[in-house]
Amino acid sequence: MVDGLVGRRAAQVARRRERSAAEPDHDCPLCPRLVAFREDWRAREPHWHNGPVPSFGPTDARLLIVGLAPGLRGANRTGRPFTGDYAGDLLYETLTEYGFAHGRYRAAPDDGLVLDDGLLTNAVRCVPPENKPTTPEIVTCRQFLERTIAAMPRLTAVVTLGRIAHDSALRALGERPSRFPFGHGIEHDVGAVRLFASYHCSRYNTSTRVLTPEMFKAVFARVRAYLEEAGDSPMSPTA
Ligand code: SF4
């Protein structure tokens, strides 16, 4: 019994270490172009977050949602993924509807919104100019996505928002993207994890009707159904 307790504590300590290793330093120096962009915006808007945006949600979640990168006036300003710009409106509404969040989303990190059984992160943690990270930046930042995945002992499902997030998540899971093509609504079994691909919930995609709210919610309905089948759910869905 004592051995079991010691083992559980050791596992908790190891997970805490993994979680902190999964978050880059606020002054992470690894991508010179993004560092220069960040410094420029720190000078222009000293009260903004202007740094790598940490993941949001519990690491013991079964669901990981991977976006592309922080929006300049959204997550880069507020410091929470998808918070403060249009993409967050649809994403948080959908997460709440399908039981992955509770509380009221008010587009601010102190709004009290809580994620349930879901962790939200980005393939690239720093805001890129024009929302376009380069390939070397995606590759460099993948180490933090890999560590995020390593810190999630119950990971069962991954939602990828857009092709870049899809391909980076696959590589972080140790797979080649060519084996698991991207397409909205496509599902792949990648080892023990079910990967659900979705178009990104950006203002551009929704205003052009490339992605409708119905299409987006259908992905999360499938995720919820899959997790219900998988069992071991910490809470029931509200939709
Ligand atoms: S994008 Fe990632 S690797 Fe590059 S500077 Fe930001 S946190 Fe560091």
Image (tube, rainbow, N blue to C red):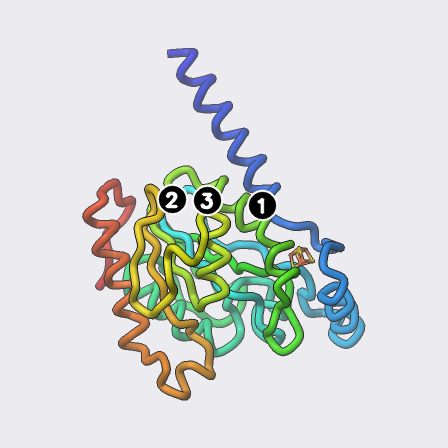
The residue type indicated by label 2 comes to Leu
Residue position marked by numbered label 3 in the rendering: 59
Residue at the outermost top position: 2
**Front residue (pair 231, 167):** 167
Q: Residue at x 63, y 70 (%)?
A: 77
Please give left or right for residue 94 compared with residue 86 in the image: left
* Label pair 3/2, CB-CB below 8 angstroms: no
Choose the circle earlier in sequence order: 1 or 2.
1
Q: Quadrant of residue 131?
A: bottom right
* Label pair 1/2, CB-CB below 8 angstroms: no
Q: How far apart are the two marked residues, 3 and 2, measured between alpha carbons?
A: 9 Å
Residue position marked by numbered label 1 in the rendering: 22
Please give left or right for residue 18 compared with residue 137 in the image: left
Residue at the outermost left position: 229
Q: Where in the image, quadrant-wise, is ligand 1 located?
A: bottom right
Image position, residue 217 (x, y; %): 29, 70
Q: Which mark is residue 155?
A: 2
Q: Secondary structure at mark 1?
A: loop
Q: How far apart are the two marked residues, 1 and 3, measured between alpha carbons?
A: 10 Å
Residue at the outermost right position: 43
Q: How far apart are the two marked residues, 1 and 2, measured between alpha carbons?
A: 15 Å
Q: Look at the image and tell me whether residue 27 can be seen.
A: yes
Give the quarter of the figure containing the N terminus: top left
Can you say whether 94 is above or below 65 in the image? below
Q: Residue at x 50, y 57 (%)?
A: 168
Q: Secondary structure at mark 3?
A: loop
Q: Quadrant of residue 214?
A: bottom left
Q: Secondary structure at mark 2?
A: loop
**Front residue (pair 187, 202):** 187
Please rate how many residues cluster around mark 2, counting C-alpha atoms within 10 Å: few if below 14, some from 14 to 19, many from 20. many
Mark 1 or mark 3, which is nearer to you? 1
Q: Residue at x 52, y 69 (%)?
A: 83
